[in-house]
Image (tube, helix red, strand yellow):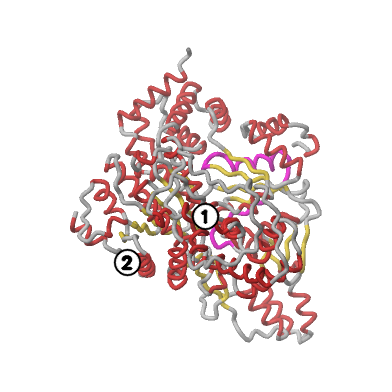
């Protein structure tokens, strides 16, 4: 944590205005900060009476942050906002290369770009009552760090999704909710039209009437939501599509039960894996954190990005180490890859077949389908095709909406039939 | 027949289990010793056929305790794990009361929900005092249940008491020794694992597997027994979908005994492979020449240097 100069804000309406602008920036970055929160924040600041930047930070944090995954975004926006406006401009220019039409070497932190965009988008530089910095404050940006080639290979930061896209995707997803037909489970629940006698309950009802059995309580099997397993290819060309789908899955999996979509948006357990040249499990990252941060963590583990994808080996690793552990309860598998594998097609076909046999349903999302008339001429793709239940494109929000439709239809196979003919 | 208080160190645990024909490695012995000493449930996870269930049986036999087994399955609910009411007997009691002209419903209610009509299921049995001290409660294949049952189990195991709606709460005077097993067909929730001591039960090494085989199939000739163990050990280093467990080793040895085989040959292996490998892909991998190659490797591994 840097030492920041003290922030002396005089007690004037400007402060409330500034906090309002700040809250709007948070909202644009996708945090749920409503008017009530803003009023709370202003009151909190007035009540807490801060003398240091840290106190101010935590006061606003307490008022505005309600979920752990928002902490990073809040921190970034705070750092950008309550600072010298000139610096703000400078910072945004750095973070948004598109503005200046050149590529910066500096890799942005997860959530930083979103914070920058949120601020930039209609931030009509509010009057900031911040004293002039005394020169030696930390306003330097370390853009000179030219990493060695190997380091870059190791910690390649994925192209980050912008705030506007996330907001839009979330809006779309809120409408989608990826409905999925529930599976019958073996657990019984009370059901007036059930076929099984619920003896204990019948007796309890009878006891209320002095032992007179007037109605028979019945039970029937309950239904349970299926599990979802996502296998994401994150090799160079695939990473942004995987990111989109992961955002999608993350939004679906974190849909609260009270949103009317059922538990986890209608899904049971949701597991996610990434593979490039190695398989890694990012389920735990996804449970609490931002998708960007989860993928960045996986990205650091991925060696040699340009080495091509080893789909066959990674699927084999999944079959060996994970398939029994996460596919045991009738899970649906989403495989996101372009299928351009450099290994032997026979080995790949055998592994995909094994995966298909262990999953209740295997859905392949292939971004190459964005080109009309795409034909599966590559050996790997032709080898995988017979062993999947459905093939779908996944390069836009609209195609992800189609995914929901295919999952809802028990026999939906997307474009598989067409591709099989074109082989 | 050992008392719990007589177990002073990890070696004692291994000794008393060996007396029951269970060959226990140091890691597992340590986990078990700590579980007994601290009174915590022991959570055993591992591939099928590595002897997780057997250890509970051996512990119960060695300590002279009763073994109570709760076999988990999908859809298992609290009532079938704790206790159920004998509905038929209750019906008869109601009819009898009506015929006898007793219409005091409160008395009838008190009479119907007593131990007389209660069918105790494993969890409740484990809370009851048993001859020989608190029982060993084996909760087998806990990964087959679902999240709601896990949550219920968590509650039962944290304070060793269960609740029956019509009777109230029944607490164990002395907590049972609890052993949970899981084949990892599902990731069991962290909250449950946190309450337990965790041990991963791995495939044994050559020496230990040879000991297990001689304990379980003593009639097998020594040379053949060594060959069998070496072959299975070599097989586990291959890239198989399902590696054979110890249970498969013992099964296979018994198959060889039944066929009066005196030594391993590619032909005998091909005929009996179904006792070791349970996936067609794996069996197809081990066609004649491959089996012969692994057999050669196994023989060279046990050849006197």
Is A381 displayed left or right of B25 in the figure? left
A296 or A201, nearer to the observer:
A296
Crowd class of label 2 (few under 14; some 14 to 19; many from 20; radius 10 Å): some
Q: Which residue does the numbered mark 2 point to in the structure image?
A: A412
Disc 2 versus disc 1: distance between alpha carbons? 39 Å
At mark 1, the secondary structure is: helix
Q: Identify the residue at image location x=72%, y=58%.
A: A55
Q: Position of residue B300 (x, y in %)?
A: 42, 19
Q: Position of residue A374 (x, y in %)?
A: 22, 57
Taking B91 as reference, is A333 above or below it?
Answer: above
Q: Which residue does the numbered mark 1 point to in the structure image?
A: A112
Crowd class of label 1 (few under 14; some 14 to 19; many from 20; radius 10 Å): many
Q: Position of residue B122 (x, y in %)?
A: 67, 57
Mark 2 or mark 1, which is nearer to you? 1
Q: Position of residue A85 (x, y in %)?
A: 56, 59
- The residue stretch that appears in magenta: B47-76
Task: Kindly indicate the quadrant of the structure image that contains residue B236.
Answer: top left
Residue B224 lies in the magenta stretch:
no
Residue B75 lies in the magenta stretch:
yes
Badge 2 or badge 1: first in the primary sequence: 1
A210 or A331, nearer to the observer:
A331
Q: Identify the residue at image location x=76%, y=56%.
A: B159
Taking B139 as reference, is B256 above or below it?
Answer: above
């Amino acid at each position: 944590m840097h030492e920041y100069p003290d922030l002396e804000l005089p007690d004037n309406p400007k402060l409330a205005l500034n906090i309002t602008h700040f809250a709007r920036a948070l909202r644009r970055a996708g945090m749920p900060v409503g008017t009530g929160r803003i009023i709370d924040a202003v009151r909190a600041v007035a009540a807490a009476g801060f003398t240091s930047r840290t106190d101010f930070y935590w006061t606003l944090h307490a008022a505005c942050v309600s979920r752990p995954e928002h902490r990073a975004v809040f921190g970034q926006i705070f750092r950008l906002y309550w600072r010298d406006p000139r610096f703000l401009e400078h910072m945004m220019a750095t973070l948004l290369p598109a503005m200046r039409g050149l590529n910066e070497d500096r890799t942005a932190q997860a959530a930083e770009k979103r914070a920058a965009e949120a601020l930039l988008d209609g931030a009509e530089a509010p009057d900031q009552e911040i004293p002039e910095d005394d020169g030696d404050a930390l306003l330097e940006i370390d853009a000179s760090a030219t990493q060695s080639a190997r380091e870059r290979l190791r910690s390649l930061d994925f192209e980050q999704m912008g705030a506007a896209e996330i907001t839009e995707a979330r809006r779309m997803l809120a409408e989608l909710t990826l409905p999925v037909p529930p599976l019958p489970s073996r657990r019984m629940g009370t059901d007036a039209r059930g076929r099984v006698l619920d003896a204990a309950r019948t007796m309890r009802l009878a006891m209320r009437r002095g032992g007179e059995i007037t109605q028979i309580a019945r039970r029937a099997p309950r239904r349970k939501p299926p599990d979802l397993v996502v296998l994401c290819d994150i090799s160079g060309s695939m990473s942004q599509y995987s990111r989109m789908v992961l955002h999608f899955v993350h939004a679906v999996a974190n849909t609260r039960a009270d949103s009317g979509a059922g538990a986890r948006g209608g899904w049971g357990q949701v597991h996610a894996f990434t593979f490039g040249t190695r398989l890694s499990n990012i389920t735990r990252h996804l449970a609490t954190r931002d998708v960007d941060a989860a993928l960045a963590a996986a990205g650091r583990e991925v060696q040699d990005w340009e080495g091509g994808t080893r789909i066959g080996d990674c699927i084999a690793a999944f079959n060996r180490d994970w398939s029994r552990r996460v596919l045991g309860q009738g899970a649906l598998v989403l495989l996101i890859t372009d299928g351009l594998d450099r290994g032997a097609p026979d080995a790949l076909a055998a592994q995909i077949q094994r995966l298909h046999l262990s999953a209740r349903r295997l859905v392949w999302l292939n971004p190459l389908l964005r080109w009309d008339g795409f034909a599966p001429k590559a050996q790997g793709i032709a080898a995988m095709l017979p062993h999947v239940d459905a093939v779908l494109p996944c390069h836009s929000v609209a195609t992800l909406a189609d995914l929901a439709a295919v999952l809802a239809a028990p026999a939906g196979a997307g474009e598989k039939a067409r591709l099989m003919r074109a082989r | 027949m050992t008392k719990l208080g007589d177990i002073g160190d990890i070696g004692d645990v291994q000794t008393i289990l060996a007396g029951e024909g269970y060959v226990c490695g140091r890691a597992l012995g340590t986990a078990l010793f700590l579980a007994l000493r601290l009174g915590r449930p022991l959570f055993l996870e591992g591939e099928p056929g590595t002897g997780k269930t057997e250890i509970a049986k051996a512990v119960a036999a060695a300590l002279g305790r009763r073994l109570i087994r709760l076999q988990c399955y999908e859809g298992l609910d609290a009532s079938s794990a704790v206790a159920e009411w004998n509905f038929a007997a209750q019906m008869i009691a109601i009819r009898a009361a009506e015929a006898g002209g007793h219409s005091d419903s409160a008395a009838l209610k008190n009479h119907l929900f007593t131990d007389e009509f209660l069918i105790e299921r494993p969890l409740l049995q484990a809370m009851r005092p048993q001859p020989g001290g608190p029982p060993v409660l084996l909760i087998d294949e806990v990964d087959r249940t679902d999240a709601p049952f896990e949550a219920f189990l968590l509650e039962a195991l944290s304070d060793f008491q269960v609740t029956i709606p019509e009777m109230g709460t029944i607490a164990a005077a002395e907590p049972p020794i609890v052993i949970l097993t899981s084949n990892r067909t599902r990731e069991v929730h962290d909250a449950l694992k946190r309450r337990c001591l965790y041990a991963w039960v791995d495939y044994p090494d050559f020496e230990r597997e040879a000991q297990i085989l001689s304990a379980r199939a003593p009639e097998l000739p020594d040379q053949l027994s060594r060959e069998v163990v070496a072959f299975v050990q070599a097989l586990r280093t291959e890239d198989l979908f399902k590696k054979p467990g110890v249970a498969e080793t013992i099964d296979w040895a018994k198959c060889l005994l039944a066929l009066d085989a005196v030594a391993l040959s590619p032909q005998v292996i091909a005929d009996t492979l179904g006792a070791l490998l349970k996936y067609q892909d794996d069996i197809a991998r081990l066609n004649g020449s491959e089996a012969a190659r692994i057999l050669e490797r196994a023989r060279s591994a046990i050849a006197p240097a």
